[in-house]
Image: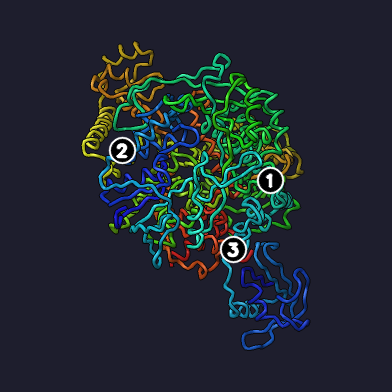
Amino acid sequence: MAERFDLLVVGGGHAGCEAALAGAKMGARTGLILLDLADLAWMPCNPSIGGPAKGHLVKEIDALGGVMGRAADATYLQIRRLNTSKGPAVPALRAQIDKYAYQHWMRRTLERQENLSLAQGEVVAVLVEGDRVRGVRLRGGEEVYARTVVLTTGTFLGAVIHLGLEHYPAGPQNRAPANELAASLRSLGFTLRRLKTGTPARVRGRSLCWAEMERQKGEELSRGFSFWRELPRRPQHDSWLTYTQPATHELIRAHLHETALYGGKIVGVGPRYCPSIESKIVRFPERERHQVFVEPESEATDEWYLAGLSTSLPPKVQIEILHTIPGLRQAEIVRPGYAIEYDAIEATVLHPTLESRAVTGLFFAGQINGTSGYEEAAAQGLVAGINAVLSLRGEKPLILRRDQAYIGVLIDEIVTKESDEPFRMLTARVEHRLLLRGETADLRLAEIGYGLGLIPAEDYERFLRRRERLAAAEELLATRRNPGSELTAWANRHRTTPPSHVVSLRELLRRPEIDLAALAELEPALAALPAEEAEEITLSVKYEGYIARARAEAERLRAMEDQPLSPDLDYAVIPNLSQEAVEKLSKIRPMTLGQAGRISGISPADLLALLVHLRR
Amino acid sequence: MVRISGREALVVADRVLRLAKGMPLSFLPPRTVYYGRVVDAEGREIDEVLSFYFRGPKSYTGEDLVEIQAHGGPVILRRILAAVLAAGAVLAEPGEFTARAVYNGRINLIQAEAVLDLIRAKTDVAAEAAFHRLAGEAGREITALEEELLGLLAAIEGWLDFPEEVEAPPEVAARARTILARFDALLAGAERGRLLNEGAAVAIVGRPNAGKSSLLNALLGEERAIVTEIPGTTRDAVAEECNLGGIPVRLVDTAGLGPPGDRLEALGMERSRREIARADAVLFVLDGSEELTAADEAVGAEVAGCRGVVAINKSDLPLKLQGVPSTVLGWPVVRVSALTQSGLDGLVTALMEVLGGRPGEGTPALSNLRQIEAAREARRAVAAFLEGLARGVPWDFLAAELRAALTAIGRLSGRTVTSAVIDEIFTRFCLGK
């Protein structure tokens, strides 16, 4: 590899790809090194991107100039909108991805990128001089020097696979694990914790009985995750829905003792929101059946994914279990399901920039920070890559606020709150959810992405035009008042009461029975608005009461967020701070009073004591 | 008594106490009374004292807490306090001990306010109600409602975040309606709870010689012993406090209503008008033994638009009065005799009805305007949730209503309360408790 990099990314998963591309686009001499180049941008679990909160993250990544949204749009097998009937803040795209096409797309994108070198190798140590990172050492002894390093080790670090009661050192799908790097991190003073996740068996499509399952079709959509391009038309593939049976549950109960978790072998903590089928049956004994989605993995293979059947039972039991389920009665297993344990750091040792507080220039992103999910990883990778370059330039870091982006909430949560299970993004974690709709991610973030040099000028100009169109339409609605004579006929046509006095179009739009298409009859300029923008305007008017309240709440909280705390603050000398608070604050080192308040165990009294101290 | 709380409480106590046991208080077991002396910084003995201490978190404040009991007397207490301050303590802000108890999670806000209510209770019923709140009985309903709301919100949030796995929560409207009904029940007793603690002001009006003063004295009756007289001239409004059905009521005898005579009388009239505007209810006294006069009508005009009760006095004499002034037509009418005291119970009941504090309906859970406002706000949000549900408002907006309800109720349970609210409450406490 080259003599010296500005930015060296270790790991080529979803976090690593975003970090490397962002760094290179910002002009840094960037290297990306991973265990096996063939695994670049790999989805070792479900080849699916999006869903509530995760879909929001992808849109925000895209709005900032990341690539995950573009890659998903280019390689989907099926795409659908979820939650459309539940309100404007929670709908989300979910795409089934052609996992090999995705990897190829990403590989080509990285290879075409200037300033970026790709290489295969195992990083066995992080080199540190004083309190600054210097680079890494590879297996074979070669040292690669870099001014900043982003570690994105995913589930490879210290990985152990559990298959029934057997376990052995291995990364996902039996890849080689990264064991020595874990030891190097420990020697640098990082505390590693064990986390656990799992994956279901893959089966051969030809062995399945489609007639016994319900077909799930994709939707024809013109917009995908990306704001910058229309969604390419691709042939969509169906997925299939089936259910576990009482016999399935009996069989699983009978073999529970043969799983690593219930047999007592796993110490890592698994995610509550993505449980194995064993866990579901133990924790919800009253449920008579559980859903199983049978989903395609790629056009290049007849391998199918069984969403909902994650398991670490022995393979011979796994096949018996599948054979109790309609559609799967003759299923052939291509790869068995397994549970995997891996090392993660405590992300509370990081700045909100994702840089280590102890080792300057060393950044962490993705599952090594205790998160789960491709989208969560990509979001962190992007932010870590950006901040690594900004730190080299001595510029102000990118720290997104909680009322600005889901990414802001995600990073604030992981660097602030100690957690013993993998962290998944949820819309319920986002207190300003009504202000952070997926469709407005570009309005919130594109300016930042452009400022960083991650969005090409022609895309940005298109965005500016979109923003101007929205502003012009808002202006038109607020000021345009039609003569009463015109309104009466119009009102009758749309079965609404003719207004008794002169009103603006905006006031008319507030009426539940009136939409923008109806108003376009009064003001033809409105007809020219693209569908997403018409929807945007309609929502902002129809629910302005709720939105105004959400804004006011965000403003109220801003005061706390704007109160900075020095990273060198000696908490031990602050009067009236509880012992627990002193310990937690000294460990987590919040950047603002607002962040301090979100640390578990910090009471209002502690905040008050801090506030009093700050005012002194 | 001098009380010391905080991380260094025992350090301070060890500096000022010389115990008969011959060792520092902090070396001895807690919750036991020790005899000894207090000394000042120069080692001079101030008084013989009894002292004991509690280890946090098992204390009133949740911190280490020392109490020193002396013989009393302001000079001794001041000298002991000076010695304690010289040993490193700082003087407590008003209400700071209870504030610390809340901060340290020992009691919730409702209980903290109950401490204040208990100290200040003016009637037995009010003291009893405050004690029940302190014991946490009433707070339990608040906590239960909070749990219900959290459960409902979680069911909805789960469905929003996991559309492919979690089904739509069943019976959302029914659950919300039950919560609403429970808020209504909570608020129904609230006005009485507030009256019990904050009391009410009743202005007694009527033309001269209608019998205002004698009715006032009759109402005061045996309670006179605990009455305090607020000084004023004979032409001013005179206020007396009494206990009507458990509610502390400030009865204000207004003077000089009617056509003004001299300048002094005009001044008294201004004052009376202010009292009427300030009162929670008006007691309008008419003389039943005479016909309605122009003076009665003039008084009636002064109280137009108020809430109140009409008392037709002198029921011991033949009734000559026919009708009441038109401005008070909707008010309840009670016949009484200040002389024989007949009809007084009916009058008190009618006054309580008008004030919204019907007696004998159990222990009110909420006791002041801040608590009632928070409960009302939570109720409003739940009602808005139900109304939005019926109108087809999207679920993510509906969830925001439930969050608003939880934020409001959090101000009662103390879960989400901001330091600003806490400070406001605790400045109302008297020093040290």
SS for dot 3: helix
Precedes in sequence: disc 2 or disc 1: 2
Q: Is residue A431 left or right of residue B369?
A: left
Could you tell me residue A596's position as x and y percent?
49, 56
Subunit under mark 3: B
Q: Do labels 2 and 3 share a chain?
A: no
Label 3: few (<14), some (14–19) or many (≥20) C-alpha neighbours in 10 Å: many
Q: In which quarter of the image is the C terminus of chain A?
A: bottom left
Relative to A527, residue B431 above or below: below
Q: Which colour scheme is used?
A: rainbow
A503 left or right of B46? left
Numbered tag placed on residue B96 in the rendering: 3
Q: Do the residues labelled 2 and 3 touch (CB within 8 Å)?
A: no
- x, y percentage for residue A172? 51, 41
At which x and y percent is residue B282? Answer: 59, 42
Amino acid type, label 3:
Glu
Q: In which quarter of the image is residue A278?
A: top right
Return the residue nearer the eye: A604 or B377: A604
What residue is pinned by disc 1? A264
What residue sits 64% from the left and 84% below the top? B40
Using residue B212 as the reference point, say whether residue A484 is left or right of it: left
Q: Mark 2 points at which residue?
A: A109
Q: Mark 2: which secondary structure?
A: helix
Q: Of tags 1 and 3, which is closer to the observer?
A: 1
Task: Estimate the spatial distance between the alpha carbons at disc 2 and disc 3, rounded to whole Å.
Answer: 63 Å
Q: Say if labels 1 and 3 share a chain.
A: no
